[in-house]
Image (spheres, rainbow, N blue to C red):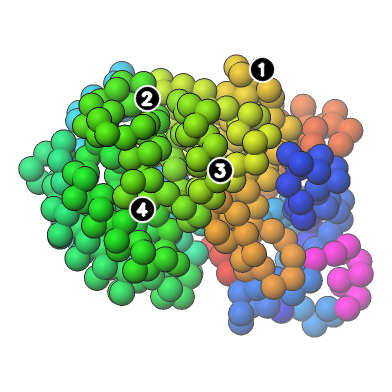
Amino acid sequence: MKLILGQTLSFFADPFEAGPDEAALWDRRGGVVVDDTTGTIVEVGPADALRRVWQNAEVVDHGDALILPGFIDAHAHYPQTGIIASWGKRLIDWLDTYTFPEEARFGDPGYAAEIAARYFDLVLSNGTTTTVSFCTIHPESVGAYFAEAQKRGMRVVGGKTCMDRNAPDDLRDTAQSAQDDSKRLIDRWHGQGRLSYAITPRFAPTSTPEQLEALGALWAEHPDCLMQTHLSEQTEEIEWVMGMFPEATDYTDIYDRFGLLREGALMGHAIHLSTRERDRLREAGASLVHCPTSNTFIGSGLFDMAGLKAEGHRIGLATDTGGGSSFSMLRTMAAAYEVGQLRGAPLHPAELLWLATAGSANAIGMGGTIGTLAPDYEADLVVLDLASTPAIEQRAARADSIWEQLFPTIMMGDDRAVTATYVGGQRV
Ligand code: GUN
Ligand code: ZN
């Protein structure tokens, strides 16, 4: 047993619905008891009481630092690690200029393994313990991702990106090979320890109707897998795709027609949606994934968090590395705050933090497993120094609530704020 001490903060309700203070459980001097052998949380409570009960536990005292559930990045592209922060393009040109040439390199298992290791080093140093990532069209890129995560004991989701049109020759599969390769990868990796597979059509413009149909059929055969894709990110993209599927009512309807819209569908971006699409997405039980640094970096638009939450959508938060400009969920929360401001609806620190933990966990169907500090949850934790730089320290010193103490780290913090990251109860 390990007794990890510090401030503790977690949610037992959605702060968008219940309100920040009603939804959160904060302890100025708290602790988390972790079972090292199972990697799960045994108890959460006040430090003094836990010390009395768990006298033989190994104590790790983080002092004033804040213990949180590890961050959950609900949409990323690990193969884009090497081309993050590439200048000057909008979505389609950005894909052609920077992304596709880089992704073409992942047929080489050695290169895929090197980038997967670098990617997980980066996300863990930023306090992210679960990633949901697109790989490339190459099965080797999926193997590299899952093997590296398994080595580190991480709970991750990934899948082979499928594209059979509007991509370079060396980045195209077919309807049949996409289905066969994805199926083989599901058999190999899905449910192995903490690994889960997501069936992954990149987005409708890079799949033929035959490929979308094949992947819809595959999902029906493997209903407990997730499905991840992109939806309505840029206006040019929407015009382009509607020309390819003239029979569809709208972009959402394209996925719907092929059995790709139901609970377990993770829709990246979801910015430019009609009322019909919003209604249909909610009714279908799909999750929307907000990627704010990507949406400002690629110039896509402003996600309607307040409106969509009020309508009852399930929403996660994500970096979208490397269309997103950061590996950090702190930076991502800051960008979500700024996008909210530009829409006239600033998000409360509790809402931001919930989105990066329990909210993303719910969005990927793991709300009972990760993202919360409570007994029986997996012990993936991040410990934040709330005074990690002089600028943050001097502002946090004036705080008169935990939210005010935390907000400067959300807005100005980076990997220097991450004191420790625990995966399955083990410090990494
Ligand atoms: N739409 C299709 N592929 C991508 C991608 O790799 N990144 C982003 N941001 N949008 C996409
Ligand atoms: Zn993406």
Mark 1 residue type: Gly
Mark 3 residue type: Arg
CA distance separating discs 1 and 4: 36 Å
Question: Where does the image place residue 31, in percent across and percent down from the top left?
Answer: 80, 63
Question: Where does the image place residue 213, in percent across and percent down from the top left?
Answer: 25, 53
Residue occupying image coordinates x 52% and y 28%: 275
Q: Earlier in the sequence, mark 4 or mark 3?
A: 4
Residue occupying image coordinates x 39% and y 54%: 227
- Mark 1 in CB contact with mark 4 (< 8 angstroms): no
What secondary structure is marked by label 2?
loop
Q: Of circles 1 and 4, which is in front?
A: 4
The picture quadrant where one finds residue 380 is bottom right
What secondary structure is marked by label 3?
helix
Q: Earlier in the sequence, mark 1 or mark 2?
A: 2
Q: Write down the residue under mark 3.
A: 282
CA distance separating discs 3 and 1: 23 Å
Q: Earlier in the sequence, mark 3 or mark 2?
A: 2
Q: Write down the residue under mark 4.
A: 259
Residue occupying image coordinates x 14% and y 52%: 173
Mark 2 residue type: Gln
